[in-house]
Amino acid sequence: MRQLEGQIRIPSGCAISAVISRDGRRMTGEKIIESLKPMHDRSNGLGGGFAGYGIYPRYKDYYALHIFYNDDLCRTECESYLRSNFVIVQAEIIPVRKMPAITNEPLIYRYFAQPLPSMLMTWQLDEDDFVARAVMEINTHLEGSYVFSSGKNMGVFKAVGFPEDVGVYYKLDEYEAYSWTAHGRYPTNTPGWWGGAHPFSLLNYSIVHNGEISSYDANRRFIEMFGYKCTLQTDTEVIAYITDFLLRRQKLTLEETASTIAAPFWSTIERRPPEEREKLTYLRTIYSNLLITGPFSIIVGFEGGLMALNDRLKLRSMVVAEKDDKVLIASEEAAIRAMEPDAAHVYAPAGGEPVIVKVKDGAY
Amino acid sequence: MDMKQYCIIGNGVAAAGCIEGIRNADSDAHITVISREAHPVYCRPLISYYLEGKTKLENIGYRSHDFYEKNNCTVLYGQEAARIDAANKRVRLKTGEEIAYDALCVASGSIPFVPPFQGLDSVPRKYSFMTLDDTLALEEALGKDARVLIVGAGLIGLKCVEGILHRVKEITVCDLAPRILSSILDDECASIMQRHLESKGIRFLLGDSVAQFEGAKAQMQSGETVDFDILVLAVGVRAETGLVKEAGGNVGRGILTDTKMHTSLDQVYAAGDCTESHDISCGQSRILAILPNAYLQGHCAGVNMAGGSEVFDQAIPMNSIGFFGLHIMTAGSYFTPEEGGELYEERGDGTIKRLFSKDGYLTGFILVGCTERAGIYTSLIRNKTPLAEIDYEMIKQNPSLLPFGKKYRVEKLGGVV
Amino acid sequence: MGINYIYPEFEVVRNDARCIRCRVCERQCSNQVHQYDKDLDLVISDESKCVNCKRCVSLCPTRALKVVKSDCLLRENANWSNDNINEVYKQAGSGGVLLSSMGNPKPFPVYWDKILINASQVTNPSIDPLREPMETKVFLGKKGSDIKHDENGNLITKLPPQLELSMPIMFSAMSYGSISYNAHESLARAATALGICYNTGEGGLHEDFYCYGPNTVVQVASGRFGVFKDYLEAGAAVEIKIGQGAKPGIGGHLPGTKIVGDISRTRMIPEGSDAISPAPHHDIYSIEDLRQLVFSLKEATEYKKPVIVKVAAVHNIAAIASGIARSGADIIAIDGYRGGTGAAPTRIRDNVGIPIELALASVDKRLRDEGIRNDVSLVVGGSIRSSSDVVKAIALGADACYIATAALLALGCHLCRTCHTGLCNWGIATQKPELVKRLNPDIGSERLINLMNAWRHEIKELMGGMGINSIEALRGNRLMLRGVGLNEKELEILGISHAGE
Amino acid sequence: MKRVFVNEKWCLGCHLCEYNCAFANSGETNMAKALKNVKIRPRIRVEEGGDAITFAVSCRHCSDPICIKSCISGALSRDETGTVCIDHDKCVGCRTCILVCPYGAISEDENGVIQKCELCVKNAAGSPACVAGCPNRAIIFEER
């Protein structure tokens, strides 16, 4: 029997792209879908997905839980778990366009919810920690239920299929976001599973990733010491947890996070000014096992911004360009041109050098 | 400034040393060499080896063919100096030609001393054994049936014996002294060597001298008569001091110099067999007519002539000499117990080692048949090494570096010497 | 003779056609196997004294010598091997405990040899170490897991003391006394040149070697030999030795005959007195006592140096390691049962302890399960034989490896396993001046540096093949390993999949 | 110039240098053939004393060599590198060099003339065989 995602480690190659408006202007999903068309050959039809930020202004104070269910039995079990932990203000099927290119759909639901205050008291956790725990709990222990999006005012949409089809399937033309990320997947040894498609997300963080990291098990075994469970055995999952751990739980800045997971070489660190050297040495030493090696280009989505990062040797392609208030990032320049034919300032960021783009304060 | 003019009277090993010494300090200036003999510098002691067949005429040269050329020397072959005009710094040749110099080295060597034997003129074939020309002349006379009488059982006479023994019928050696090699050996060692030579068929008449020659017959003072075909006169040599003496320089048995080899005449140096040396093994001035001495003196003179600074103050007599496989080495002075000397003696199978010390220094040695690493003993004499600083007991038995102690070895074996 | 007689284990074979009577063999054999007989004009060998150290073989200029295993064996018996029988004979004759040196030679499984390493193909690129930076630097010590910020929101970058190594290897503890001055000098100089550390063992630190302090781990063992303030302050780290892989649960005994001159001074015990290291530390009878010693040493060194606790790999090692991690130690060193020794009772060496591979895997897992893996570094030793063993150890979860036997081999050891006689012909495990001088530290340190540089190159090649360009991304990266010929239980303990999975 | 230096701290007294020297200068390609049943005449010599002191001695290639100055036949000379060399055709075996060498580094060869270390420049080894064969780097060949 073929093993499902999570039962076996799945390396994969990919296409990524993103667009963000620094002015916080909302864009429908049409353009980001366009961007994936010229990169068609970077995917193989076994996964595509999108993350949009700012799409649920009406429920912006609620966690938007997107969940796949194998069947209604699973859904019943999971909803019962949710009800005992959350106040759910809205529960609905995520609307889709049926199409021949997308088959084998699970049940796809979303819930806008808040943790029950009594549970927060009981567990002595803040909201985010509680939600993260709940996500781990469902994904690890409730078979047939999989939470694939859990942030506020953001959402992940993913499926097995080519990404441009997935976008149409999820009706992304009907959502408006100030920031979009997208992903086309080329897994090497799996039939593909909906949950395994990218973006991978926890709370407000979403990751799209192209690459195969050679440090995977070192990273996984380290991060699992801190309550994360890597159920999918994918690079993206572990990167997402590392990002959550460093940004949210250790309160590192984006730059510090980048300096941890794509730490400069020791020889580079030695040449830096003393203060910076001390900080970089510290980060590399304390979280030496969070250094990610091997080829990757990732785009981290978070509330109010994006960060794009290459591995320190720049073993994967990634280009950045600008157009008006928009910043566009993709595996290939063609993808950028598909979104904005006359985008300017096209450049390829150096390995290990984070590109951080934030929406103006208050504009999201 | 004009280049200096150097002149050397003589063309032996001292002269060669002088040339190399000059070149050490002055790489350009011209050197004039006045050579009585018509040969480039050769190794005088090799004449017996030549006769013996141990070396060839082409190998007898002391230096390479282009030695003079390379060193910017003009050699006046077959010329003799007649006079030194020290005041005007000129050398006059017998031809009347004059050579100006800025610095002069007298390396005129020595000449055979021939006692006034009665009837010597009547001897048809008589030879000295000093020069290559002497040797070539003697060689002409040699023949399987020739009987040879050699007058003088010193180093020259006996080396001649070794050189010609296989080419003649018989050899008789006479000497006024009661033992052979009287200048370097004591009675016992001399008799060992004598017996060794006698075993090769050589006849000795010692403590005896020729009373008179009658053609090819020598009437000995002892009354014995020796018939011979060839007479070799090897009684001794005399330092050639005349030029310096006539120029007003200080002369004893040899030319007198200071430790820089400078004579009492301005800018006149002297080196080699014509000089007296200060023998540090006995503290006296004496003629040390040995090759190493000649070279070292010549070199020292040369350096100082050219404005450099070198001192030669380690002169000692030393000889390494072998006859028919029995080798002897001697060096320094032998003080008897009456003179305050101490003797260490070791005898082996046909070997004798005698080390002479005095006042805590090694002063001399005689080694018969046991010559390995003798230079270690020589160095103790030359360097006046206090015996208290080394393990004398050990070194007496075995000349080696162990007795010198670790510091010496670390310095010498671990550094550049 | 008679009932006590045991036929020599080795035969010295001399090709007389090649022997030129140079007598090097005779001069170089401290066991006096060779002797030149003038009358016969022959070099005669007494193989009953031969320990097969190959000194004579190595120095014979005409290759006239070889030492081979004797074929005069007892009747074959799969149960009663020759060794078993001869040991009975020896003990029946002597009534004594059998002594052995170096590591366990018995044919137990070597898990390193049943583990294979991964490499990249197509889906991600291998990295060429000749073209790209390839980092092997490691920091050993407590890291902690939580980052703190000051009131201005800046990172507080102070870490507990760390031991910085240019590559994940250290020379493990061998005391001055068990090995020679020149062996120590070779190790110290090599460690300094390489930017790694060597370890004093429990023999103290010779005054000449204080200058190598920044590359020295100073050991505090149950005998406390040579331990005083300057000693503790001299080292880069302090190691508390609880046990040794070759002889878990056993102390040490350096006979008084070896306690001479510098050794007596360095150990700070009178000349001629036996140096006895008790089996336990007499101030450590439980884990809370260990914590006291750890903090005593930290106090003594003003919290500037990491404290290592070294234990032998025994059955309950995971729990022991967890206890040590919570005792305040910065680094745990685990010594597997194949680790070497200068002298140990044979039965203990050959039958006590567990393989380092399994110990490492279970300790690393246990510390991760408890969330305290980042609170300690793990150093493993006990027969790390090659760079691939190092890579496998790191991938299983070690921070660094200790090597000793490999280092001794580089210094000339031929593993004859007779260190306990003190007659080491290679100048390593001896204190006889004429033997000690056979190890010139110029050569010794150069060979150690060569070995480590060679391993470093190989480690980089292996890392590059896996697409990993920094050693920390290999640490605990068990996906890079696969087992061959291992059963389910072994795979489970090692935490790796079988090849093909 | 590069010279052979000896550090007695590391000399083991194994005498291998002597055999390597004799072999290098034998002209043979097989050591057993060269040295079997031969009384070797090495140009380097190991001295041994009590207290385990051993060291090897060979020509120091003095910068001011008295052997050359004393040579009666002109057979000894320094080559362009400073190596003190012997011309066997010119040497007559008078041994004056043995008489003056303060290190005892010159000896007689089997043909009655003298032999000394010439740093293996004239034999197949090309560089000092004693150095190459020293098992403990007690003999080294370097510039100092």
Image (spheres, rainbow, N blue to C red):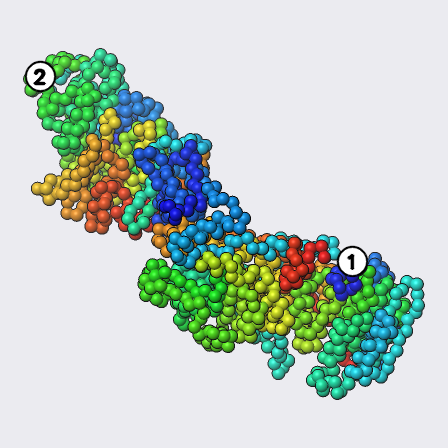
Numbered label attached to residue A189 = 1
Asked whether, in this view, residue C259 is left or right of residue C139, the answer is left
Q: Residue at x 16, y 43 (%)?
A: B357
Q: Quadrant of residue B79?
A: top left
Q: Residue at x 50, y 49 (%)?
A: C81
The amino acid at mark 1 is Asn
Q: Is residue C158 visible?
A: yes
Q: Nearer the viewer, residue A156 or C333?
A: C333
Numbered label attached to residue B58 = none
Q: Nearer the viewer, residue A303 or A170?
A: A170
For mark 1, does the 10 Å Cα neighbourhood hold few (<14), some (14 to 19), or many (20 or more) residues? some
Q: SS for tag 2?
A: loop
For mark 2, does the 10 Å Cα neighbourhood hold few (<14), some (14 to 19), or many (20 or more) residues? few
Provide residue B121's location: percent of width, then percent of height. 14, 16
Chain holding disc 2: B
| Quadrant that contains the N terminus of chain B | top left
How many numbered discs?
2
Provide residue C288's location: percent of width, then percent of height. 50, 77
Q: Residue at x 71, y 86 (%)?
A: A122
Check if mark 2's residue and mark 1's residue have beta carbons within 8 Å: no
Q: Is residue C267 above or below residue C127?
A: below
Provide residue B19's location: percent of width, then percent of height. 31, 36
Which residue does the numbered mark 2 point to in the structure image?
Answer: B224
Q: Quadrant of residue D79?
A: top left
